[in-house]
């Protein structure tokens, strides 16, 4: 069984706009984490080797770690790659969830074909890992989806 | 699980209404009328979503008297498959938020 995901969506804005939403932290923080949780970028250095770190909080709670990683490739308005297996400056880390994501931004019909390919190790490995830390991590996502999904339509 | 049924399961999760229904049913069984309530779509369209969820094995429903009640089937997928399906849902939702944000705040006015 493959442990990869591919997501594709046509966005009604040029690649330059979609790129800004990814590359500029002030915009990125607005969509990366589902409402009502809040996102804060601690590191968002969009260049190869640049650090990528976000915190999250709910209400007025404490800021908690969400994701730490490193950008591997950054071709403005075309392609962006990050991994959670490395931190800033390509330093190896033991991530909570090991993944590498490849985002591409391609002009299409006056808009942008946005694609994300997300690679994991094996799902069995990830699921075992996930069962240990599900409550604290993204495992509550299905619950959140119930709150979030209607706002996405 | 065969790839074909896995494709069905993932396809079912690709829609925000269907994800919301699963999210709601994770909290417990619910009658169709309660499930349909929050959505600004007609009942026939909503029932089509339920059909997709039933056919892909995410939910089952039973009718008692006039009330049809839906349940989520958490055991449908192995832990690994469920995990991967959840990751897909995370990325689908994230991509949806990105698209909404860009189209609302960053798209040039003349491109719409």
Image (tube, grey):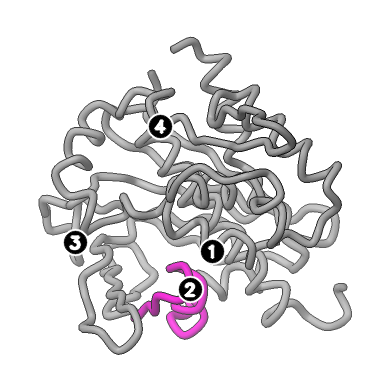
* Residue at the spot of label 4: B74
Question: Of the residues under marks 2 and 3, which one precedes in the sequence?
Answer: 2
Q: Relative to the observer, which residue lies in front, A56 or A53? A: A56
Provide the residue designation for mark 3.
A87
- The answer for how far apart the CA atoms under marks 1 and 3 are is 30 Å
| Magenta-drawn segment | A23-40
Are discs 1 and 4 located on one and the same chain?
no
Mark drawn on residue B14: none
Number of numbered discs overlaid on the protein picture: 4
Mark sitting earlier along the chain (2/1): 2
Which residue, given by chain and number where applicable, does mark 1 sit on?
A148
Q: Viewer-proximal residue, A23 or A42?
A: A42
Foreground: disc 1 or disc 3: 1
In x, y percent, where is residue A74?
44, 61
Residue nearer the viewer, B43 or A134: B43
Residue on which the image places disc 2:
A35
């Amino acid at each position: 069984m493959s442990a990869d995901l591919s997501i594709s969506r046509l966005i009604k804005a040029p690649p330059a706009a979609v790129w800004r939403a990814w590359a500029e932290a002030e915009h990125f923080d607005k969509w990366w984490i589902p409402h009502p949780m809040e996102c804060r970028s601690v590191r968002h250095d969009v260049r190869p080797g640049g650090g990528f770190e976000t915190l999250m909080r709910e209400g007025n709670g404490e800021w908690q770690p969400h994701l730490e990683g490193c950008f591997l490739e950054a071709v403005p308005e075309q392609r962006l790659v990050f991994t959670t297996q490395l931190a800033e400056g390509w330093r190896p880390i033991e991530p909570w969830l090991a993944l590498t994501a490849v985002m591409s931004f391609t002009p299409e019909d006056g808009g942008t074909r946005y694609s994300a390919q997300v690679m994991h190790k094996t799902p069995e490995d990830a699921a075992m890992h996930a069962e240990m830390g599900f409550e604290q991590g993204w495992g509550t996502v299905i619950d959140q989806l119930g709150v979030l999904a209607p706002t996405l339509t | 699980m065969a790839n074909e049924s896995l494709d069905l399961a993932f396809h079912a999760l690709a829609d925000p209404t269907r994800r919301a229904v699963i999210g709601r049913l994770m909290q417990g069984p619910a009658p169709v009328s309660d499930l349909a309530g929050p959505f600004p779509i007609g009942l026939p369209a909503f029932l089509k979503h339920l059909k997709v969820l039933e056919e892909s094995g995410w939910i089952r429903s039973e009718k008692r008297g006039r009330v049809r009640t839906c349940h989520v089937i958490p055991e449908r997928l192995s832990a690994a498959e469920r995990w991967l399906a959840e990751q897909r849902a995370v990325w689908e939702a994230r991509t949806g938020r990105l698209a909404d944000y860009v189209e609302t705040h960053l798209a040039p006015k003349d491109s719409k």
